[in-house]
Amino acid sequence: MRTILAIDGGNSKTDIALIREDGLVERTWRGGPFTPQSSGVAAAIDVIEIAVGPGPYADHVFAYVAGADLPIEEVRLRDEMARRGFAPEIVVGNDTFALLRAGASGPWGAAVVCGAGINAVAVGPDGRVARFPALGRLSGDWGGGGGIAEEALWHAARAEDGRGPATALAGVVRRVFGTATVEEAVIALHFGDLAYERLHDLVAPLLETARAGDVIACEVITRLADEIAVLGIVAMRRIDLLDIPCEVVLGGGVLTARDPLLTELIEARYTAGAPHAKLVVADVPPIVGAAFKGLDALNAAPEAYDRVRAAF
């Protein structure tokens, strides 16, 4: 029976599963962060080998990973896996494709991920794809947990020193980082006394502060809702999905938390800009999408998908 090694490589962890074509999950592993954009291709692939051991692993590898934002990056990752003999057949794609397949009822639609970063993809029923470079501000991106946390800190610093309007975010920063002033927190982040990753601790209280009515916090969350909507709507427009019923899968930690204010803002924007869209918050992990993509390629039976979904 043919086997699939499904891989979901994220900025915080890497999930891996060995799955038979009948949907039986034989084994799972968890590895460290998959960060080819910062650590390099070889080091990113090392994360898989450290978790699973040396290959070959299966008949097919389906890896959907962060840091594969451009087609050439997908090729480089795939070539490194092939060089190490992971499997005879290897497919590598951006992790947004796995999110789409995990949350949609079929292989096409749109997906927007808002976790540490933000990205989107749309796939048409005819196979056409719309995607973005997702290289940060260089390619016009803003948002994700990292983006809104930086924005909260920016506003808090300006509120404290008088350059900007007052906001409860100044108190949020002091409380989250345990500092007497926002400036003290900024300096600690600058020198590395506070790990820069700690900025993500501001996301949940930022959302809470917006729900409480703080004007500046509301502006940040409104801008995030605008970005989440424009990414999905533009991706759909580019491959002619706006005039037909289309599922839009929302994933990533910021969106799966289902914050009521952010959710309301997002729904309103899709209602106005893509009235045929059906918003779906992913209720299974992205590794399921990687597995489903593998099962699609093997023309697996419907019950195989049910077994995978039940396993996760």
Image (cartoon, rainbow, N blue to C red):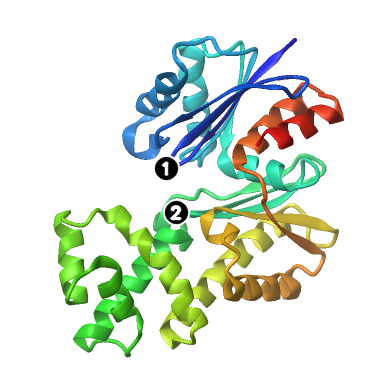
In the rendered image of this protein, does residue 108 appear above or below residue 200? above
- Residue 295 on image: x %, y %: 75, 26
Q: Is residue 111 above or below residue 55?
A: below
Query: Pointer 1: what residue?
Result: 12
- Residue 220 in view of the camera: no
- State yes or no: discs 2 and 1 in contact (Cβ < 8 Å): yes
295 lies above or below 215: above
Q: Position of residue 218 (x, y in %)?
A: 49, 81
Q: Residue at x 48, y 73 (%)?
A: 207
- N-terminal of the two: label 2 or label 1? 1
Q: Which residue is mark 2?
A: 116
Left or right? Give the position of 53 relative to 90. left
Q: Quadrant of residue 49?
A: top left
Picture coordinates of residue 83 (x, y %)? Answer: 47, 12
- Bin the neighbour count of mark 2 within 10 Å (Cα to Cα): few under 14, some 14-19, many 20 and up: many
Between residues 239 and 259, which one lies in front from this camera angle? 259
Kind of residue sitting beneath label 1 = Ser
Q: If the image is split into quadrants, where does the C terminus sit?
A: top right
Please, what is the three-letter code of the amino acid marked with disc 2?
Answer: Ala
